Structures are given as structure tokens and as C-alpha cells.
Image: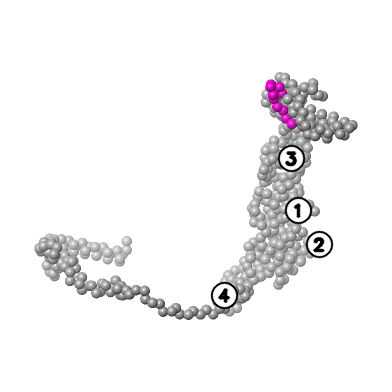
């Protein structure tokens, strides 16, 4: 009933003349708790890094039209730990591609015979080929595969014995601090914290003997093995193995959320409404046409008005699926309706579009009406008197007659041949230039047959040009 009431309210708001807020129904798989948001992925979802995209998750009723929108969820930082805890309880999904790769990196296996999760003991220390023992104390007769193992065991027993002492002021805290070697003798070093003595350091001799376990092998209750003995993991240990604190980044593969058992909720951040697929989701508005384009009278070219509703995400921490409904209309010369919703509709109402900047904001300084007057500049004194007021053209015109009277100017006409009708052209060149040379009159006329050949060539070329202009090619 609540869901139907919300949808009905949204439909009313979408058709109203004013904007209003509405609450979309929460998608399947999403849940909100006091601790935050969770989402259980389904097989049809898509994962992009740390983001799960749910197509068609949201439904908005706009004028009786069911409009679908996607939703996206960014996995919270603790999502891999929740996924690892779910894997511990459901070992049957261990063969999925992403989960198998995740387990392989952590070197975790599942023992079908025992029904236990196991991992090679990370605390196992390979043998050095020797065994070690504390010289004095309760472990003087016990031998260990490493000095560290002997020291840690001794520190634990010593601390337990001290804590059992009846006098609280005599109790001490023991901590193994490592080993060192001096003058060929091995020592184990301990830090001792005492309420009476303060922090002190105690040193003990360590005995060494040869071991039956070769160097690089591992000493186990079952004997020497080349690999560490498998260690059974608790749920918390499995979670820590798959999410090591010293490993930066995001160890969980992308496909793991889709491989978990159906309905497994993972913690997510506040979801996104109508985002584009990808690793960087963002809330996007959705424009939904609500009617056919209607012609606007007395417009040339003919314009059409089409109403729409913008569904603008407006989520809050308490209302993650809240949207703002903004009706409006577009004006264009396209008579064809826009049938499909568009995600990037941000157009303003038509009356706002038609206004100029000064019509919208008449009070701004740029729109103030200011009368600009300009006074003429005062008369400026002449800085110089030009020698050639008409420029180079005036110089040429004034000197042209003098240039024509020079012998060099008349040289070019004297070099051209003398052409007379009916006879071969004669070409005589006067090589006498006053003041320069005295070469006399020289006849350089070519033979008459050259002119006949030239005429034939010109006529043939003219015929070929005429053919090309008429027929092409």
C-alpha cells in the first residue's frame, strides 16, 4: 500500500504545473539499516571496480508512463571482509572465477574431507639444520627447530608463572626480544617488565645441536615436511587472510559480489540515481516528454512546443531515493516528438530561454543605459613637412618624360622584329647605344621557312583545342 501511495503521489506531482519532491520506491536488493546502506547483487548487475550498477532498478510513473532508471552502489571499505565471512559459511562457491583467484592469492584451501578451511601455517619457520634449547629454566630439556621458537615458548611460560605469583608486586611481564651471538655462544634475550624493578633486559644461554630435519624443511608433529603444516582457519582468520592489513589496494576481485550466494548483502555508500555505467557514478537528471509537439501560431519558420518533466535526483542521508520533479517545455522547429527519455535534460522553461541577458537581470552593471559622449580632439601642430606629398606616384609622373628620353628606355623597341604584310619579317638590331657601345646595325632574321612551320604549328594547335572544347576528352 505504501509503495502504491508513493507512486500515485509522484504521478500527481509530475503532471502538476509546479515542481515538487517525490520518493521513488527502493530497488530490490537494497536495504537501509541503522548502520548504513546494504545491497545484495543479482546476476543481471554489472560491476565496475568497486561500483555495482543495477539496470532498470528505479521506476517513475510520469503521466501513466512507467519510466525506468538505473541505480549504482559504491561498495564500502569493509565490503571485502563481509564477503569473506560469507565465503567461510558457503564453501561451495569457492570454485567461482573471482573467488578462486582471491583464495589463490591468499593460499587458502578448503579440505573437503574434514570440512575445514586451511592455510599453510604462516608462523612456521623452516629448519636451519639445528635444534635449540634454553640452558636453564622449565624448558631446559625441550628442543626447538629455531631459537625464536624456544625463546617465545620460554617467555610465555615465564610470564604465566609470574602472573600466578601470590604477591602482585612481584609479578612480571615477559616478552621475547630476539637472539644474538657473541664469542661463539648463542643467547636468547628477553625484556622483563616489573612493577618493582622497572623495564629490564634479561639474557639466557642457548644450547645448539644438529637436527634430523634438513635445512629449509619444516619440523611438524608428523615429521619433517617440505611445506608447512596446514593450519585450520577460523572465520576471523579467513577474513584476515583474504584481507591482509599490510596489502594496499583492493584485494577482492570485481566479480566476487556477483558470485556470492543470492541475497548476500554487502555494505555500500549512499546509492546513486540514474548514473552512467562506470567506476565514477554520479546522480544524473532524466528528461521525460509528456506530450506531442504542438504548433505555435504565427511563427515563421513554424515552431513547436513540447512539454516534458525533468526528474532531478535530490537524495538526502535519510531519503536516498528522493527526486525533484520539474515540469517544463521545449520550443523547436522539429515537428517530430522526442519519444525516449533523455538523461541530460537541463533546458530551462521556454519563457526563460527567450529572454535576453538584460531581460533576465536588468539590474547588473552591463545592462545599465549609459549615454556616451566624446569631445573632439584639439588641433595638433605639424611635426614635419613631407618632401613628396603625392608619394612615389607623384615622383614617377614628374620624372616619366625624362625617363622616356633616355637611350635605355628606347632599347626594347629596337630589339623587336619589323613585320610587313606579305613578306618574311626582317629582324635587325641596332647595337649602338649612345655612350655605351657602338655595335652597328645587325641582321638576326631567321630563314623564311621557320615562319611557315610556326604557322602550321599554330593552326594545328588551334584545331586540336577546338576539338577538345567541342567534344571534350
Q: Are marks 2 and 4 in contact (CB under 8 Å)?
A: no
**N-term-proximal mark, 4 vs 1:** 1
Residue at x 81% of width, y 33% of height: 197
Q: CA distance from mark 4 to mark 1?
A: 51 Å
Residue 37, numbered label: 1
Q: CA distance from mark 3 to mark 1?
A: 23 Å
Please give the residue where the numbered disc 2 appears in the rendered image: 1
Scheme of image coloration: one colour
**N-term-proximal mark, 2 vs 4:** 2
| Number of the front mark, 3 or 1 | 3
| Number of the front mark, 1 or 2 | 1
Residue 319, numbered label: none
Residue at x 57% of width, y 71% of height: 333
Q: CA distance from mark 4 to mark 3?
A: 69 Å
**N-term-proximal mark, 3 vs 1:** 1
Q: Are marks 1 and 2 in contact (CB under 8 Å)?
A: no
State the image coordinates of residue 122 (x, y, percent, origin top left): 72, 33
Q: Give the structural element (helix, strand or loop) at label 4.
A: loop
| Number of the front mark, 4 or 1 | 1
From where the camera sits, is residue 25 visible? no
Q: Is 418 situated left or right of 41 in this image?
A: left
Q: Which residues are magenta?
A: 176-186
Please give the residue where the numbered disc 3 appears in the rendered image: 240
Please give the residue where the numbered disc 4 appears in the rendered image: 302
Q: Give the structural element (helix, strand or loop) at label 2.
A: loop
Q: Is 39 situated left or right of 163 in this image?
A: left
Residue at x 60% of width, y 78% of height: 297
Quarter of the image with the N terminus is bottom right
Amino acid at each position: 500500500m505504501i509503495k502504491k501511495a508513493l507512486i500515485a503521489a509522484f504521478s500527481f506531482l509530475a503532471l502538476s504545473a509546479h515542481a515538487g519532491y517525490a520518493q521513488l520506491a527502493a530497488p530490490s536488493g537494497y536495504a537501509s539499516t541503522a548502520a548504513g546502506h546494504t545491497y545484495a547483487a543479482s546476476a543481471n548487475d554489472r560491476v565496475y571496480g568497486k561500483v555495482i550498477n543495477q539496470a532498470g532498478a528505479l521506476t517513475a510513473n510520469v503521466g501513466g508512463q512507467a519510466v525506468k532508471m538505473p541505480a549504482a552502489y559504491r561498495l564500502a571499505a569493509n565490503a571485502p571482509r563481509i564477503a569473506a565471512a560469507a565465503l567461510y559459511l558457503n564453501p561451495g562457491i569457492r570454485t567461482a572465477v573471482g573467488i578462486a583467484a582471491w583464495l589463490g592469492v591468499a593460499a587458502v584451501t578448503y579440505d573437503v574431507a574434514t570440512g575445514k578451511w586451511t592455510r599453510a601455517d604462516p608462523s612456521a619457520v623452516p629448519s636451519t639444520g639445528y635444534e635449540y634449547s634454553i640452558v636453564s629454566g622449565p624448558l631446559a630439556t625441550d628442543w626447538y627447530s629455531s631459537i625464536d621458537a624456544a625463546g617465545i615458548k620460554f617467555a610465555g611460560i615465564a610470564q604465566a608463572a609470574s602472573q600466578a605469583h601470590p604477591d602482585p608486586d612481584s609479578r612480571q611481564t615477559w616478552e621475547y626480544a630476539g637472539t644474538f651471538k657473541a664469542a661463539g655462544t648463542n643467547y636468547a634475550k628477553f625484556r622483563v617488565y616489573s612493577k618493582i624493578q622497572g623495564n629490564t633486559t634479561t639474557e639466557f644461554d642457548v644450547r645448539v645441536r644438529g637436527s634430523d630435519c634438513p635445512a629449509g624443511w619444516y619440523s611438524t608433529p608428523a615429521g619433517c615436511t617440505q611445506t608447512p603444516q596446514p593450519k585450520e582457519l577460523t572465520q576471523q582468520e579467513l577474513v584476515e587472510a583474504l584481507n591482509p592489513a599490510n596489502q594496499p589496494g583492493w584485494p577482492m576481485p570485481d566479480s566476487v559480489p556477483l558470485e556470492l550466494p543470492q541475497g548476500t548483502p554487502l555494505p555500500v555508500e549512499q546509492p546513486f540515481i540514474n548514473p552512467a555505467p562506470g567506476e565514477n557514478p554520479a546522480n544524473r537528471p532524466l528528461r521525460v516528454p509528456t506530450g506531442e509537439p504542438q504548433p505555435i501560431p504565427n511563427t515563421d519558420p513554424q515552431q513547436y512546443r513540447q512539454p516534458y518533466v525533468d526528474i532531478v535526483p535530490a537524495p538526502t542521508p535519510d531519503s536516498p531515493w528522493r527526486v525533484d520533479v520539474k515540469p517544463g517545455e521545449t520550443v523547436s522547429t522539429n515537428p517530430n516528438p522526442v519519444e525516449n527519455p533523455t538523461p541530460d535534460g537541463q533546458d530551462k522553461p521556454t519563457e526563460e530561454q527567450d529572454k535576453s541577458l538584460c531581460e533576465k537581470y536588468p539590474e547588473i552593471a552591463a545592462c545599465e543605459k549609459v549615454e556616451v559622449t566624446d569631445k573632439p580632439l584639439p588641433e595638433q601642430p605639424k611635426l614635419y613637412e613631407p618632401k613628396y606629398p603625392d608619394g612615389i606616384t607623384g615622383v614617377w609622373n614628374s620624372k616619366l618624360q625624362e625617363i622616356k628620353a633616355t637611350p635605355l628606355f628606347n632599347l626594347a623597341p629596337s630589339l623587336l622584329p619589323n613585320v610587313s604584310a606579305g613578306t618574311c619579317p626582317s629582324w635587325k638590331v641596332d647595337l649602338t647605344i649612345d655612350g655605351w657601345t657602338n655595335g652597328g646595325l645587325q641582321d638576326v632574321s631567321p630563314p623564311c621557312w621557320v615562319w611557315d612551320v610556326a604557322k602550321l604549328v599554330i593552326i594545328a594547335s588551334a584545331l586540336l583545342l577546338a576539338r577538345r572544347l567541342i567534344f571534350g576528352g
